[in-house]
């Protein structure tokens, strides 16, 4: 699986594209990879109310990448199911490797 479309290098770290499903019955970050849309998929148990789903996504991505939540910010898609995250302090290769292991 090639996650290069979903995870790309950035001068501060990397950019990660997600397509989220809020209000799911189980939590899974990442839950899959959509090769047609070039994004990782995430199932979130939180509802998209008052930023709760965004917070849960940031929390779970931080756990997956073994970094602090403060190193992650939502660049675009605050009120959309398609989100772009900026992750500081980790390379695109490190992020891809971590996500690939979780998707096996």
Image (spheres, grey):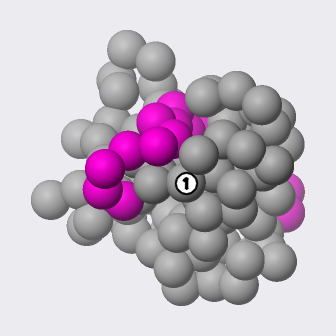
User: Of 17 and 43, which appears nearest the observer?
Assistant: 43
Measured as percent of width and height from the top left, residue 42 is found at: 43, 46
- Residue at 61 percent across and 72 percent down: it is 59
Please state the total of marks drawn on the protein image. 1
Residue 100 in view in this figure = no
Which residue in the rendered view is the most extreme toward the left? Answer: 104
Which residue in the rendered view is the most extreme toward the top? Answer: 36
- Residue at 15 percent across and 59 percent down: it is 104
- Residue at 24 percent across and 41 percent down: it is 1
- Residue at 55 percent across and 66 percent down: it is 61
Residue 36 magenta-drawn? no
Please indicate whether residue 8 sits to the left or right of residue 35 in the image. right
Residue 23 magenta-drawn? yes
Measured as percent of width and height from the top left, residue 60 is found at: 52, 69
Please indicate whether residue 75 sits to the left or right of residue 89 in the image. right
Q: Which residues are magenta?
A: 10-27
Residue 7 in view in this figure = yes
Q: Tag 1: Cα neighbours inside 10 Å, few (<14), some, or many (≥20)?
A: many
Measured as percent of width and height from the top left, residue 88 is found at: 78, 69
Disc 1 designates what residue? 46
Assign a secondary structure to mark 1: loop
Measured as percent of width and height from the top left, residue 101 is found at: 25, 67
User: Of 12 and 32, which appears nearest the observer?
Assistant: 32
Please indicate whether residue 44 sits to the left or right of residue 53 in the image. left
């Amino acid at each position: 699986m090639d996650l290069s479309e979903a995870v790309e290098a950035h001068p501060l770290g990397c950019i990660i594209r997600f397509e989220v499903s809020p209000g799911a019955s189980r939590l899974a970050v990442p839950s899959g990879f959509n090769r047609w849309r070039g994004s990782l998929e995430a199932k979130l148990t939180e509802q998209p109310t008052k930023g709760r789903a965004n917070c849960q996504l940031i929390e779970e991505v931080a756990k997956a990448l073994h970094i602090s939540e403060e190193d992650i910010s939502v660049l675009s898609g605050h009120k959309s199911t398609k989100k772009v995250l900026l992750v500081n302090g980790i390379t695109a290769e490190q992020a891809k490797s971590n996500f690939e292991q979780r998707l096996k």
